[in-house]
Image: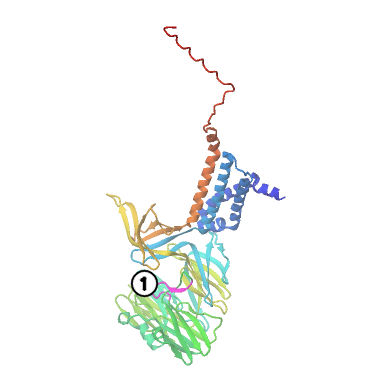
Amino acid sequence: MFTKLVRFLGSIKLAVPVLGAIASILIWATFYESKVGSLVVQQQIYKSPWFGALMFLLAVNLGVSTLSRYPWRGARKVGFALTHLGLIVLIAGSAAVIHLGVEGLLLVRTDQPANHLVRVEGELLEVMDDQGQVQQVAVMVTPDKVISPHQFAGLTLLDYDENSVETVEYRAGDTTDSPAVRLVLSSDRMGQTFDQWLSPAAEMVDLGPAQLELRQAANQTDLQQLLADPAQRQARQSGTLLMKVGDVDTPLAIDDLRRQDAVINDIQVHLLNVWPDFRLGDQNQPITASQDWLNPAVEVEVTQADLQERWFVFAQAGPILAGDEALLGLEWEYQVPPSPASDYFRVVIANQKLYYAARSSQSFTSGPLVIDQMIQPGWADFKITLADWLPHGKRLQERLPAPPGVEGVPALQVASADGQQWLTWGESTLIADGSHPKMAAFGPRMLALPFQVGLDDFIVERNEGSESVAMWTSQIRIENLQGDSTQQRSVWMNHPTWYQGWKIAQASWNPGDLNQSTLQIKREPLWVTALTWSGALLTVLGIGVMFYGPTLWKKRPVSVALEKPTKPIAAEPAPLPLATQDG
């Protein structure tokens, strides 16, 4: 039985259907890739267990067939063995390339520091639970919107929209909901009128020439700062942490907490970290991506007697408890003063009253705000009217496909125990999930290089006598992560450079911005490259020996040995002596 199985594994009866199946799959995958992209094909086919099992079966067939012909005597058998061995090595090398190879794009600029984050194909979903544990998974979406995986970290992945815009409305809610206001913006010159809802929990609404926002003042000092003319304000503050115990709100200035812990009654508040632009780093550790206050967050430790809690408080998403359960009954809110860099229209809530501050390039105004009051902020002929105010507004979110001509962003819809929610690409979102809220982020998959690349100059050469582009070159510097070792390199089309086993090539460039260049970063471990090359050489060598070896063997030079005679050769008679003259 075992002998029959071995013979079948090495027989042509198995090799033909296996080769036929692999060839058919590869042909179909080529056309399928043009429709769904290489990432889907790699995940569904090339990296799938069933395709790997099929290739392994082919390698077993080749190996058993080769061993069954041992000993390999003669040119044909030696060539046969070398060819089959080369094919086995090629299969192993191809599997290593698929599963271990890395490829992505690196964006570098002359006006920015060196970059070490490579954008690889696909999207990434990150979920941080209330214990601070972070889980990551690559999200794959087929053209018919089949999402894989379907469930992850307690969330169900429901839908995906590649180009979408968000619409938000508010309705009257209960006392736990945050306030909201509705503004009507109109322009006679442009012939436009549209509504915009604002909430303290939402980000600023960017209108292009200016921003809209709704803020809550913690106290009279905070109100004065929010309504003050930015041109007269001092350096930007880090904001205020609002701690609520029962019905008592206590504002804590972050700048004061940096210098000294705060003690409210018998509760001690210790500031651990401040992140102006909160992100999760390469090791899933909190970092700040920049010093711009785009996604502010703080980490505080609260102690009362022998009880201790640790909180992450986000200005945009709210608080997250880093622990099992809340023991002290605290509520938190992080309020950061808005950046005065651009023009804005700001609505401020203080003591159940509304105020406004309008800034333009030419003027600044502020004052009380009531329903149906119209304000001219100074942006061309725009007029802003307060149409509605909800002290407790329930947010109704809907994401729709972007209209023609409107650029949207990808979004992923997820469901938790408390309902459904959209995750906007590149943003962090707080998800209510019973008593264990989560922080989720949906964005690009990034790979951290063991070095960083900076762009010193981008040179475009043009053909003489015309403006047509002849060549473009990126002059780059390659640094270690500590920045104390630098190498200067140049890359251009079809002329890459290598560093520590990584291939750096010119991928694309932006004709409208010559301070930017996009590089292709690719890596295969050296042993993988050696494996594939060895397999190819063995296959070519085996074919050569198998087909040309017998002919060369026949034409080899043959040495002929002389045979010894059976009888001795008679000696010639000696010549007779010449007669003497006397004889």
Helix, strand or loop for the magenta stretch, by majority: loop
Q: Position of residue 533 (x, y in %)?
A: 49, 50
The magenta region covers 284-295
Visible residue check, residue 37: no
Q: Position of residue 532 (x, y in %)?
A: 51, 51
Q: Quadrant of the C terminus?
A: top left
Q: Position of residue 174 (x, y in %)?
A: 53, 83
Q: Is residue 573 above or below residue 430?
A: above
Q: Is residue 460 above or below residue 409?
A: above
Q: Is residue 443 above or below residue 201?
A: above
Q: Position of residue 335 (x, y in %)?
A: 42, 81
List the residue tagged with mark 1.
187
Disc 1 residue type?
A: Ser
Determine if the magenta segment contains residue 291: yes
Q: Quadrant of residue 294?
A: bottom left
Q: In front here: 376 or 93?
A: 93
Q: In front here: 381 or 566?
A: 566
Q: Is residue 130 left or right of residue 242?
A: right
Q: In front here: 91 or 335?
A: 91
Q: Is residue 250 left or right of residue 18?
A: left
Q: Disc 1 on helix, strand or loop?
A: strand
Q: Is residue 360 left or right of residue 564?
A: left
